[in-house]
């Protein structure tokens, strides 16, 4: 079974630039999550989708972050414009259990904002 | 704010010893999960314990849950160098939303 795919793996940009991350969840998983993990901290949930609907985006900085999950499969997370404090690893995860069970994580995208 | 908080923040032991890490949380939960993160394999699910369960085992892992104290512990027996990683607990507050919240993690180093 293929795991959660993310791209790119690494991205370096300058502040005020834009960046987009892509995630392909495990086939058949209806729930998709985007997390931000700053060095030394645990993952912080940014947004949770159930199919193509948003379950929770209370911690998503909506003035600069946006996410979509068209057709309930792939998802993209965008930052525009980026700030220095956005430097982090962005993790995508998927689950078949609607949040009630195990999450499968992708390898993450390490973003450095200079 | 994060729901679960792990303790200790860091733990250093010798191979063969047992490692115990704890997780405390603030509000009632549906489930509590433990995850491991290392540079090689990313974040990997270890075990899930439901709010009506008190103890679960998986191989060398033993998880307990005390809902009256709002705490959980993860015991790794006979540790190996390959167990070196960060360990996180994740909780989802009860009430139907099942929104997961991770703690800051315990960094475990197992010396060969």
Image (cartoon, grey):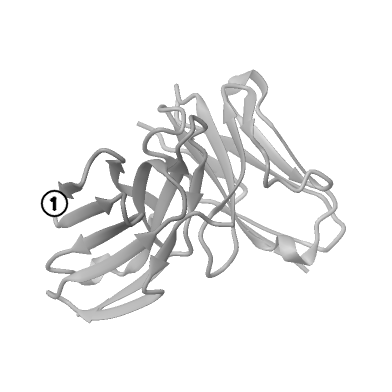
* Residue A96: quarter of image: top left
Assess disc 1: are there few (<14), some (14-19) or many (≥20) residues with their C-alpha within 10 Å of its C-alpha. Answer: few
> Residue A90, percent across and down?
60, 52
Q: Chain of mark 1?
A: B
Picture coordinates of residue B89, whole percent (x, y)? 39, 55
Q: Image quadrant of residue A39?
A: bottom right
Q: Quadrant of residue B69?
A: bottom left
Residue extending furthest toward the top:
A71
Q: Where does label 1 land, which residue? A: B59
Q: Is residue A113 above or below residue B34?
A: below
Q: Is residue B24 above or below residue B11?
A: above
Which residue does the image show at 18% across and 46% down from the upper left?
A: B56
Q: How many marks?
A: 1
The percent coordinates of residue A9 (x first, y second) are: 58, 53
Q: Residue at x 47, y 59 (%)?
A: B103
Nearer-the-camera pick, A82 or B49 = B49
- Residue drawn 67% across the image and 23% down it: A70
Image coords of residue A108 (percent x, y): 54, 51
Q: Out of B49 and A46, give the one closest to the viewer.
A: B49
Q: In the drawing, does residue B15 fall left or right of residue A100?
A: left
What secondary structure is marked by label 1?
Answer: loop
Relative horizontal placement of residue B91, taking residue A112 as reference (left or right): left
Image quadrant containing the N terminus of chain A: top left
In the shown orientation, is residue B93 left or right of residue B61? right
Q: Quadrant of the C terminus of chain A?
A: bottom right
Is residue A76 left or right of B60 when viewed as pictured? Answer: right
């Amino acid at each position: 079974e293929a795991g959660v795919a993310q791209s790119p793996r690494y991205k370096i940009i300058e502040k005020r630039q834009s960046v987009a991350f892509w995630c392909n969840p495990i086939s058949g998983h209806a729930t998709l999550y985007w997390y931000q993990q700053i060095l030394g901290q645990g993952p912080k949930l940014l947004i949770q989708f159930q199919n193509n609907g948003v379950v929770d985006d209370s911690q998503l900085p909506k003035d600069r972050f946006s996410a979509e999950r068209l057709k309930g499969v792939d998802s993209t997370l965008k930052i525009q414009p980026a700030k220095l404090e956005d430097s982090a690893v962005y993790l995508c995860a998927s689950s078949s259990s609607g949040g009630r069970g195990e999450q499968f994580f992708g390898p993450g995208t390490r973003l450095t904002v200079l | 704010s994060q729901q679960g908080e792990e303790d200790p923040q860091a733990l250093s032991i010798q191979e063969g010893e047992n490692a115990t890490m704890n997780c405390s949380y603030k509000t009632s939960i549906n489930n509590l999960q433990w995850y491991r993160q290392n540079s090689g394999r990313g974040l990997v699910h270890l075990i899930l314990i439901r709010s009506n369960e008190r103890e679960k085992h998986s191989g060398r892992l033993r998880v307990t849950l005390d809902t009256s104290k709002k705490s959980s512990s993860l015991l790794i027996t006979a540790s190996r160098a390959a167990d070196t990683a960060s360990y996180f607990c994740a909780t989802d507050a009860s009430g139907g939303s099942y929104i997961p919240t991770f703690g800051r993690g315990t960094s475990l180093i197992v010396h060969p």
